[in-house]
Image (cartoon, helix red, strand yellow):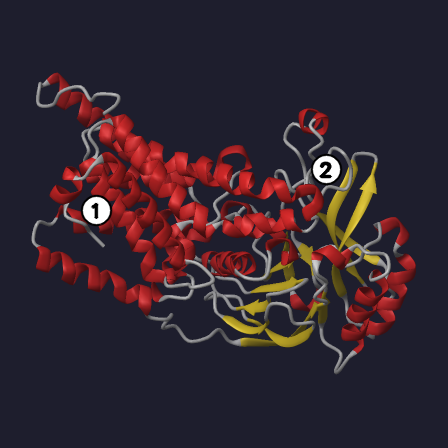
């Protein structure tokens, strides 16, 4: 996980950049579809080596950027999939979307490495600067924390630390440990330490599986490809498929359909709701649908009672930029560019925020529509602690391989962080029941039409992270960055170091 600092420092600038690009790309193997968790140590190790090799702040920025571009460019390659749904209209945008996204996220890593170099090139500074930009990535401009390093840990023993520290605390710990490796000067010690670090990334969670309740959840997966989902000739087949799955077998305690499961507006859907209620045979049904009011269109979730009446409505509040709305709609409309999933020119309207739904005998549920499960702080912002988390999603947008699986990993993260089970109904998969330790107890995998009945796992006790949220890590990271700046200023005043040059 470490390359000789002397060797890297002696390399040509282009070779150092290539090392960053390759090291970052190697880190993509930590995420689906390969999911080799230990691979996440490679880009982190490369960043520490490149910090020592950087000749200036500008050089450090370029090296961090190249590492980030390699990492995000390969990990997020699924981002091209939505543009292929209507390839004749939007296919040309795909390479630009991936390139700009990788470049934009890579700038965060470039800034982290440049800051650490500006503060004297000390490894401990990179611990706080890289953790800081990763936290910033989760919040800035509505946030996009996809492909964080802790995401790679969900199926490992190390991933259980999310219950204690959340994604940002775990990220800080990973960086601190790798900084310790790079502080050593003895190759044998470094090798032994890296092997010890790898053990919790290779071992599965050791805790026993969560106990199960007596309540049965049915997850319905219609498997409607995105390019067919809204085809008028195919809509009846997909709707009837979901109704048939709802009517099959024993009556469950709850039936859950995926995001935008019905292609109708809420105000026009009562006749279909009546049919669904008959199929459910008294079981409540949760499903995704669009609705409209004076403020605009909403991507919504509704609950239906035994009579097919809507009893609760939840509107998605954390929308996908450029997918469900355009940040500058007037500008992009003039360029002929619209949000991929928008209902109107201005896209969807935002809901009021997180809310908890009453699910009767099952307890309460925090609804999450698709993208909302990506944000740990949104889940932690629930007005009260629910009995379980409930995600409905349409991952057909994300393609057939890495995107849906990476989205599933983030749902597992939320379960571990909150100590709560999570039920997940996805149009094309993966529909799953996840226990409070983040383990998948039952699932219907990608591109399989059908349904799965499974018992709802028992909720665990409130986790430390569910009580504290991100605030302790915000304060710790800020304290570390301020200490780095003050220490650097002290050394400069004492004449111990020269002012850093801006470029090579």
Instruction: Give above or below for 369 relative to 278.
Output: above
Q: Which residue is mark 1?
A: 179
Q: Residue placed farthest to the bottom in the image?
A: 249
Identify the residue at image location x=50%, y=50%: 77
Q: Residue placed farthest to the right in the image?
A: 271
Q: Position of residue 210 (x, y in %)?
A: 48, 73
Q: Position of residue 23 (x, y in %)?
A: 31, 49
Q: Are marks 1 and 2 in contact (CB under 8 Å)?
A: no
Q: Quadrant of the N terminus?
A: bottom left
Residue sitting nearer the eye, 117 or 355: 117
Does residue 318 appear in this view?
Answer: no
State left or right for residue 148 relative to residue 8: right
Identify the residue at image location x=60%, y=51%: 81
State left or right for residue 265 relative to residue 198: right
Q: Which residue is mark 2?
A: 347
Q: Quadrant of residue 360?
A: bottom right
Crowding near the residue tagged with mark 2, few <14, some 14–19, many ≥20 C-alpha atoms within 10 Å? many
State left or right for residue 128 relative to residue 55: right
- Mark number, residue 2: none
Counting residues from the start of the chain, the first of labels 1 and 2 encountered is 1
Q: Position of residue 148 (x, y in %)?
A: 42, 49
Mark 2 element type? loop
Crowding near the residue tagged with mark 1, few <14, some 14–19, many ≥20 C-alpha atoms within 10 Å? many
Identify the residue at image location x=29%, y=53%: 42
Mark 1 element type? helix
Q: Quadrant of the C terminus?
A: top left
**What is the C-alpha distance between the residues marked 1 and 2?**
44 Å
State left or right for residue 414 relative to residue 347: left
Q: How many marks?
A: 2
Does residue 181 appear in this view?
Answer: yes
Identify the residue at image location x=20%, y=40%: 123
Q: Position of residue 121 (x, y in %)?
A: 19, 33
């Amino acid at each position: 996980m470490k390359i000789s600092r002397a060797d890297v420092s002696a390399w040509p600038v282009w070779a150092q950049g290539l090392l960053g690009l390759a090291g970052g790309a190697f880190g993509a193997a930590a995420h689906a579809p390969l999911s080799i968790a230990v691979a996440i140590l490679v880009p982190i190790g490369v960043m520490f080596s490149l910090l020592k090799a950087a000749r200036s702040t500008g050089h450090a920025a370029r090296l961090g950027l190249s590492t980030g571009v390699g990492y995000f460019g390969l990990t997020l390659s699924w981002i091209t999939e939505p543009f292929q749904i209507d390839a004749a209209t939007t296919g040309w945008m795909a390479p630009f979307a991936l390139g700009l996204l990788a470049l934009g996220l890579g700038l965060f890593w470039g800034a982290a490495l440049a800051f650490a170099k500006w503060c004297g090139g000390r490894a401990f500074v990179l611990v706080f600067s890289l953790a800081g930009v990763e936290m910033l990535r989760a919040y800035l401009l509505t946030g996009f924390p996809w492909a964080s390093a802790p995401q790679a840990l969900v199926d490992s023993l190390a991933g259980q630390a999310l219950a204690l520290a959340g994604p940002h605390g775990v990220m800080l710990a990973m960086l601190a440990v790798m900084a310790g490796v790079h502080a050593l000067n003895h190759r044998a010690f470094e090798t032994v330490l890296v092997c010890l670090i790898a053990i919790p990334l290779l071992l599965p969670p050791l805790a026993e599986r969560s106990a199960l309740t007596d309540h049965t959840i049915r997850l319905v997966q219609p498997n409607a490809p995105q390019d067919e989902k809204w085809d008028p000739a195919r809509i009846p087949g997909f709707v009837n498929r979901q109704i048939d799955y709802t009517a099959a077998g024993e009556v469950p305690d709850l039936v859950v359909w995926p995001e935008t499961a019905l292609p109708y507006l809420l105000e026009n859907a009562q006749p279909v709701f009546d049919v669904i209620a008959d199929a459910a045979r008294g079981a409540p049904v949760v499903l995704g649908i669009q609705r409209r009011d004076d403020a605009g269109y909403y991507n919504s979730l509704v609950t239906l009672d035994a009579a097919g009446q809507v009893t609760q409505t939840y509107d998605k509040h954390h929308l996908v930029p450029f997918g469900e709305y355009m940040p500058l709609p007037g500008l992009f409309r003039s360029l002929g560019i619209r949000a991929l999933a928008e209902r109107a020119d201005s896209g969807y309207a935002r809901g009021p925020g997180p809310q908890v739904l009453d699910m009767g005998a099952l307890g309460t549920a925090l609804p999450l529509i698709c993208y909302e499960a990506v944000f740990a702080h949104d889940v932690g912002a629930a007005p009260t602690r629910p009995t379980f988390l409930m995600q409905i999603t349409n991952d057909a947008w994300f393609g057939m391989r890495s995107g849906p699986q990476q989205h599933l990993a983030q749902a597992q993260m939320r379960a571990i962080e909150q100590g709560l089970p999570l039920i997940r109904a996805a149009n094309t998969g993966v529909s799953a029941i996840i226990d409070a330790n983040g383990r998948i107890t039952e699932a219907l995998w990608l591109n399989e039409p059908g349904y799965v009945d499974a018992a709802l796992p028992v909720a665990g006790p409130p986790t430390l992270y569910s009580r504290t949220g991100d605030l302790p890590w915000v304060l710790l990271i800020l304290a570390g960055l301020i200490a780095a700046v003050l220490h650097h200023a002290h050394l400069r005043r004492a004449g111990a170091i020269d002012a850093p040059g801006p470029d090579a």
